[in-house]
Amino acid sequence: MGNPVSGNDDSMDAFGNECRDALPFQLEVSYHPNDYNEFFFKLGFGVGNGLNEVSPWILAPWAADLEDDVQDINGRGRDYLLAAWYKHTRVFQAGSTLGATIGIIDSTDYIDGNAYANDEYTQFMNEAFVNAGNYNLPSYDAGAALELTVGEWTFSGLGMNIGENDDGDNYNFWGVEVGYHPQTTLSAGNYRLILAGTSSEFLNPAGDENESRLGYGLSFDQEFGEIVGGFLRFTWQEDDAAVDYKSMYSGGLNVSGKAWNRDEDNIGVGYARLKGGNGDVEKSQVFEVYYRAALNDFAAVTADVQYMDDDLIDLDPREEDPDGWIFGLRLTTEF
C-alpha cells in the first residue's frame, strides 16, 4: 500500500540516503442491525516501517499504522485489534441526532477532522498534515464518545484511558470539539474549535514531576467552487510537561482533477511550520505536494514529494540539522 523512497540533499550526508517500503493492511467490519445501532471492529497488520524507523526528523514521513504501530498497542499487550465499538444513534423530531459510542475507539474519528488533510492513505503522508500533534490525540484504546448534530452545528466529546505514554504511565485523555458546517456562496465549509487534555502523568522537562497536557486550536477547510479547496490548522499547547512543539501552523490547497477531465484525481499542496517547545527542537518546517491518480473505483496511486527541516538546539557543532527531501510512491486499494 505504500513505497516511500528517500532522496536527500548534501546536508543529509551524515544520515545517508535510504530507500524503504512498507505494506499496511486493514480489515474493517461494520454491522447495522437497524438504522440506529452499529457494531464495528478494525484489524490492522503491517509489514515494514518504511522510512519512519530510520528518519532523523521529529515528525514521521508517513503517519500510517505500520508494523511496529500495530503490536503491543499502547502497552496493552494487544496486537492487531485497532478498534471494536458499539454505537447507538437517536434521531429527534427536529432532525437533530445524538450518537453514543463505547469500546476501543480512535480519538481522531471524533475531533480534528479536515476534508483535505486528514487521511494518510489517500491525502498527505506526513504526520504534520494528518492530525495536529499538539492535541496529543491517542488511538485504539478504551473510551466513550458523544456526537450531537443540530442543523449546521456539531458537538463532539470523548474520554479515553490509555495503557501507557512514552514515560510508561497509564493516563486519561479527554477532548471536545465544536464544529460549524455551512453551505455558503463559496460552497461547503467546515470550521472547528478543538480543546483536548490529559491527566497528570507526563514528566516535566526536568523529569522530576508529573504534569498534565492541554492543547487547543482551530481547523478550517473550505471549497472554492468545484475545482479548488483550501485548509488551515492553528494549534497550541501548554508546556508544563515536556513537549516537542509549542505551536503549529499549517495550510494548503486541494485541486480537483475536474480541471483536466480526470474527476477522481487531485493534487494536494501543504506547508507546516512548528515552533519548538521546551526540549531540543527550535522549529520544524514541512512542505509536501502529491498527485493522486485513480486507477479504477478501488485503487489509486500517489506520487508524493516532501521537504523536511528541523532546527535543533545545542546540537553538536560537528553535526548538521536534519533537512532534506523524501520521494514517495503510494498505492492504495479500498474495497
Image: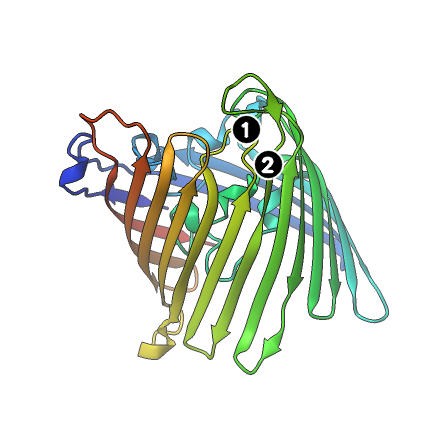
Viewer-side residue, 113 vs 263:
113
Q: Position of residue 44 (x, y in %)?
A: 50, 37
Does 134 sit left or right of 302 as displayed?
right
The reply to whether the C-beta atoms of the residues labelled 2 and 1 are less than 8 Å apart is yes
Q: Position of residue 234 (x, y in %)?
A: 50, 54
Report if residue 110 is visible in the image.
no
Report which quarter residue 283 is drawn in. Answer: top left
Q: Position of residue 99 (x, y in %)?
A: 76, 54
Does 48 sit left or right of 10 as displayed?
right
Q: Residue at x 53, y 32 (%)?
A: 80
Label 2 sits on what residue type?
Tyr
Mark toward the start of the polypeptide (2 vs 1): 1
Question: 161 above or below 154?
Answer: above
Does 294 sit left or right of 189 as displayed?
left
Q: Secondary structure at mark 2?
A: strand
- Identify the residue under disc 2: 140
Q: Secondary structure at mark 1?
A: helix
Residue at the bottom extreme of this rendering: 185
Viewer-side residue, 230 vs 313:
313
Determine crowd level at label 2: few under 14, some 14-19, many 20+ residues with C-alpha closer than 10 A.
Answer: many
Determine crowd level at label 1: few under 14, some 14-19, many 20+ residues with C-alpha closer than 10 A.
Answer: many
Viewer-side residue, 183 vs 335:
183
Report which quarter residue 174 is drawn in. Answer: top right
Q: Residue at x 39, y 52 (%)?
A: 272
Question: 162 above or below 169?
Answer: below
- Identify the residue under disc 1: 73
Does 80 sit left or right of 181 as displayed?
left
Label 1 sits on what residue type?
Ile
Disc 2 from disc 1: Cα separation: 7 Å
Residue at the top extreme of this rendering: 208
